[in-house]
Amino acid sequence: MALRIGKKRIFFGLSFLSILTLTLALLLLWFLISPRLRQIHPLLPLLVALGLALFISVVVGGLILLFFSSITERDFLFPHGKKQVTVKVLFPLVTGLATLLGISRERVKNSFVEVNNSLVKATRRRIVVKRILLLLPHCLQNFDCPYRVTSTFANCQGCGKCPIGSLIGLAERYKADIAIATGGTLARKVVREKRPSVIVAVACERDMVSGIQETYPIPVYGVLNQRPNGPCFNTSVDLKRVEQALKFLRREDED
Ligand code: SF4
C-alpha cells in the first residue's frame, strides 16, 4: 500500500498540534474551575473531566481516521461526519495556529486542497457520479479575448490563447457540465442551478478552500490555477491534472 503524504504534512502537522494545544487549554481550564465545581457537587469535577476526555477522544479518533484515509487513499471514514470535522472545525483552528507560527495561509490552503483531494479519492466508491460540473474562474480567459464566454461557451473560438478552448474539449470528452464563475456569489448560483453530484474546480487557494467549505457535502476535486502574471489576470491551469480528475471520476483511470 503506497503512502502519499507530500504537501499534506503541513495540514496534518498543524491539525495534531491544534488538538494538542486545545487539550492543554481544556486541561488548564478544568484545573482552574474544578474547586468551584467541587463546591457545587463533589462528583462534578470527575464528570466534567470524563466529558472532556470523551470530546478529545472523538476529535483525535476522527483526525486519525482522516489521516490514514488521506495518506493511503482508502476509505476509513464513516459515511457521514468525519470529513465535515476537517471542513468545518479543523480548518479554522489550523489557520489560526499557522498565523501564530508564521506559516503562510497560502501554504496551509494548498495543503488543505491536497488533503481534500485525497479524501475525495479515498471515498470514490461512495461518490455518485451522475452530473460532473467543471467549474472555472473567469481569470483563465485571455484578458484581450473579444468573445464573451461567461454566457455561452459556444462563443469560444478555441484559438489557443488561453486554456478555455481545451477545457471545453475536456468537458465534452468526459461528459461534464462546464461553467465559468466571475466570483464566489456566481459560483454558488451556478452550483444551485446545475445541481452537480460532484465538482472539478479550478481556482486559486483562497477561492478553492471557501468553495470546498461552502459546497459541502458535494465533493469537490480541486485543481489549483497557475498565476504567471499575478493573481486574477491571464491565469492558467495544468490541463493534465484537470483531465486526471475527470478520468478518475469517470473511472477511466481503472482501465
Ligand atoms: S481560447 Fe481563444 S477564443 Fe476561447 S476564450 Fe480563450 S482567447 Fe477567447
Image: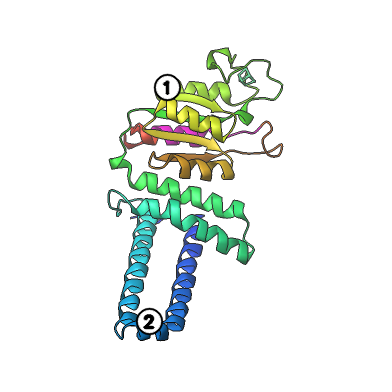
Kind of residue at badge 2: Leu
> Looking at this view, is 152 or 111 the one in front?
152
Q: Is residue 21 visible?
A: yes
Q: Is residue 70 shown left or right of residue 157?
A: left
Question: In the rendered image of this protein, does residue 28 appear above or below residue 100?
Answer: below
* Residue that carries the numbered disc 2 in the rendered image: 37
Kindly identify the residue that appears in the image at 46 percent across and 76 percent down: 24
Kind of residue at badge 1: Arg
* Residue that carries the numbered disc 1 in the rendered image: 173
Secondary structure of the residue carrying tag 1 is: helix
> Looking at this view, is 72 or 20 the one in front?
20
Which region shows up in magenta? 235-247
Q: In 3D space, how far apart are the residues under numbered discs 2 and 1 (Cα atoms)? A: 65 Å
Secondary structure of the residue carrying tag 2 is: helix
Residue density around tag 2, few if under 14, some if 14–19, many if 20 or more, within 10 Å: some
- Label 2 beta carbon less than 8 Å to ligand 1: no
Q: Is residue 5 visible?
A: no
Q: Is residue 17 shown left or right of residue 161?
A: left
Where on the picture, by quarter, is residue 38? bottom left
Locate the C terminus and report the quarter of the image it occupies. top left
Q: Position of residue 19 (x, y in %)?
A: 45, 68
Q: Position of residue 194 (x, y in %)?
A: 42, 25
- Queried whether the magenta region covers residue 243, the answer comes back as yes
